Amino acid sequence: MYRLLLTSLLLAVTPFSMVTAAQLPDTAPGYGKLGYPLPEIGSYALPSLGRAANGEIIDSRGQRQSLHDIFSDRYVLLAFIYSTCSDVNGCPLSSHVFYKIKSAMKRDAELADRLKMVSLSFDPENDTPEVMRLYSNNFRYAGKAGEWQFITTASQQQLQPILRAYNQVIQREVDSKGNPVVGFSHVLRVFLIDPDKAIRNIYSVDFLHHELIINDLKTLLRQETVQGRMSKTAVELDEPARLSKPGDDKQGYEEESYVTRSLDLESRRGEAADLLGIANSPPLGLPPIPVPADNPLTREKIELGRRLFFDRRLSLNDTFSCAMCHVPEQGFTSNELAMAVGIEGRSVRRNSPTVYNSAYASLLFHDGREESLEQQVWGPLLARNEMANPSVGYVLQKIRDIDDYDGRFEAAFDGRGVSMETLGMAIASYQRTLVSANSAFDRWRYGGDKQALSATARRGFDLFVGKAGCASCHRISDDHALFTDNDLHNTGIGYRESMGIVPEKQPILVAPGVVLEVDRAVIEQVGEPPPTDVGRYEVTQNPNDRWKYKTPSLRNVALTAPYMHNGSLGTLREVVDFYDRGGVSNELLDPLIRPLGLSETEKEDLVAFLQSLTGGNVDTLVADAFAAPVGDVGKGDPSWVHGTEVEVR
Amino acid sequence: MGRGRRILMLLLSAVLTLAVSWADSEELGGNFSLTDHNNRPFELHQLKGKLVLLFFGYTYCPDICPTELANLSAVLNALDDQAERVQGLFVSLDPGRDTPAVLHDYVRHFNRGLVGLAGSEEEVAQVARQYRVDYRRHEKEDGGYSIDHSVNLYLIDSQGALSAVVPYGLPPQHLLETVRGLLAEMADKDSPS
C-alpha cells in the first residue's frame, strides 16, 4: 500500500495520461512466468514447520465452523486477505495465484481432489459473509473443478487468536497524526497445510507462484504414497464428543454478531443408555471393571444412583447436585472453573476431577485420601463448601421424606432402606458405569486399525512412551491402558502454589471482551487468601509426601480442562510446556520430572496424542445423563428452612 | 519501505478524515442517483438489462484510478459485439474538484463508452456507503489534498443486484473472463423461457 502511495507522489507531478499502462511496474513473479526451473517432483523434502492452528470462522453462508472443519481432510492452501486490499503484491496476488491453480484443476483431477484453497479475511468489520460471497463470485469462472472457499470471522475476538497462531501481524495503517488511512499493512504469507494439519510450506511474495505450489503438492502426494499411508485425519476423531462442550464463555459478547455457544435445548434431548451393558463389557482399551463383592451392579442400583447424582435436594438448601460440579457435557468436570465452587458460592480449594473411569481408581481425590467410591460420596455431601449437609443422619432423613424415593432403595437393596451404606452403594454403582474408551488411540493400539490414529498423534505416542517419559506414570499396558499408575507424585505444581510463585500481574476479565491486567497487590486486597494445600502430606503427615498428588488418568483429557489439582493449567499445550520445562523444581520433585528438550513439533505431536484419547462413547454417556431426572424441591418435599413441608412454588 | 512511508507522511498532513462507517444491517449495493458527465440526472435503474462495472475514484488520483480505468477500457474493447451489453461507470469521490465537465474529459480520455458520475458530498457518501467503499481525505501541506480510497470494482447484474466484487490489481484477463462469465449467465437468465 505505501509503495503505491509513494509512487503516487512521484506520479502526481506527471500528467496522468502518461500512466495508462495496464500493469504497474515490479509486480510479483506470481503474475508472470516463473523465472527459474522447478526441482523435480519428489526430489526434495518438505518437513513440517509446525501445526496449523484451529479457530472459529464463518463461511460465506454465515455458518459458524471450525477452521479445521473447513480444511476437511485435504491439503490446504490458506491465505489471509481482506476484500478492499489494493496492494497489487498483497491479497490480490494470492487470489490471482489461487485462480491460476483453480484453473489448473480443470485439467488435473488429482489436484482438484486433494487440494483445497481457503481465503480468510482479517477484516471482519467490513468483510461480512455477504461481502466474502461477492468477492468469491468473481473467481467462479476459473472452472467448476476443485474447491476454493472464502471465509471470515465473527469478530476480532475470534480472529485474533488465529492471526497469532499463524504469526500474521496486521496493522491498520495510520498517517503521521495517528489517523487511520484506508487499508492495512501486512506481510503476505500463504500456508500449505497437509491433512494432518501440519504446515509444510510458507510462501512469501517472491515465491508465491502457482507452478511452485503445484510442484510442492505433487511432491507431498508422491511421498505420501511411497510411505503407503492414506491420510486420514484427526478431525473425525473429535466427533464422538459432539455433546461435550463448555457452556457459553461469552467470547465476542460485545459484538453485534455475537451468538451464544450454549448448547441449545434441542441437542440436549436425552437418550437413556444401557449403562449396565456398558459396564459389563467396557469399551476397547479398558479391562473389566473391579466391582466390590458386596455391591454387584444391578439395573435398579444404577438407576437409583443416577437419580441421586442429579438430585439438587441432596444439598443443605436444595440447590446443589453432584452433577453441578461434575457436569456431564463438560467431561463430568467443570471446564469453566479452575477450582470448584460449591453451595452459596463457597470456594473449594481443588479442581473437580472427572468421574469418567473412576471405576478403576484405587485412590480417590487428588490426595488419594479415599479408596472406594462407596465411601467417597460422603466427602462432598458433608463438606461445608460443597453440599454442606450438617450430618449423615440429616441426609438420610431427608431422602426418607422425599416421595420420589419411596420404595426405591428397598427395591434395589433387597428390602434394605436408605442408609449410609446403601446411599454410597447406589451412587457408586452409577459412577462405575461411566467407563469411556474406544478412542482413536484404542482403535489403533488395541483394535488393529492402522488408520485410526493420525500421523501426528502416532508421533506423539512415540514421545509419550519414549523421550518424554510420560508413560512411566500415565501407564499403558499391552492389552489395556488406564493412563495412571494409581500412585502419587510431586510434579512441582503444588509446590509452586504453596510458595505463592505467581505472576506480578494477572489478566482479569471485567466485562465480556474487556480484560485488564491487574496488579497482584490489588487482587490480594479483595480476594480470599490462597488456600493452603500440601497434598498427600495432609493424609500421611509424612514430610516427604508434601505436594504429592494422584496421577490422574488421561482418558478424555481433551474434555476435562482445566488441568492439575488446582486447575492452574488451562490447555493441554500448557501442560506439555510445563513438563518440557521440567515441572517446578523443589527438593521433593519426582526424579522422573526433568527438562525434556522437546521441539515445537514434538510438543504439538504430544498434544495431538492427548487429544486422541477421547472415548468413542462419551456422547452416549452424556445423552444418557441428559435423560436423567433432575431432582428439585416440589410439593410435599421437606423444606430445609423450617423442617416442615415445602409450599408449592 | 518504512522510511519511504515516513517521508511521505511528512509531506501529507492529514487533517480531515471523511470517516465512513455504516450500519452492518444496511444492504449491500442497490440503486443510487447522481449526475452524469453530461450534467443529466442519472439513476442506476436506467441501466437495467446491462451488466454494470462500477468503479470509484477521482480525477486527481495519481495512479490507481488511471490504471484501473485503463484496464476497464481494455476489457470493454475486448468484448467487441458484447460491449453494448456492458456499461462502465466511474463515480468521483471528490465533489469539490470533479464537476461533470471535468469528468467528461477525464473518462472519455480512457474510453468513449465510460460514464463519469458526480454528486454532492452527501450523495457520494451515500453511494460509497452502499457499496462499502472506504475513503478519507488527506490535506497536503501545500493546501491541496488527496483522497485515499479502497479500489474494488463492483459488478452489477442486469437486475441491478450486486453480483461480484473484483479486487484491484488482478490482470485484465481475469476481469474479462469474469465479465464474459456473467454475461453468459445473464443471457440464460434473461431469455424468456
Image (cartoon, rainbow, N blue to C red):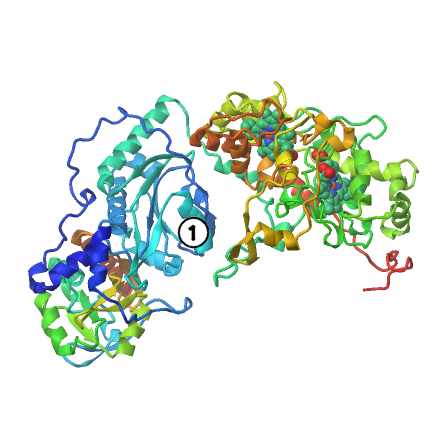
Q: Is residue A63 visible?
A: no
| Residue at x 26% of width, y 77% of height | B121
Establish if A292 lies above or below B120.
above
- Specify few, some or many for label 1: CA neighbours under 10 Å numbering under 14, 14-19, or 20 or more: many
| Residue at x 60% of width, y 48% of height | A246
| Residue at x 90% of width, y 42% of height | A418
Image location (x, y in percent) of residue B163: 30, 61
Image location (x, y in percent) of residue A205: 24, 43
Q: Which quadrant of the view contains residue A420?
A: top right
| Kind of residue at disc 1 | Leu
Establish if A476 lies above or below A402.
above
Front-lying residue, A412 or A24: A24
Residue ID for mark 1: A159
Q: Chain of mark 1?
A: A
Image location (x, y in percent) of residue A336: 62, 48
Residue A523 shown left or right of residue A358 in the figure = left
Say what secondary structure mark 1 lies in: helix
The residue at the far bottom in this view is: B40
Label count reads: 1
Residue A304 shown left or right of residue B59 in the figure = right
| Residue at x 87% of width, y 61% of height | A646
Front-lying residue, A199 or B109: A199
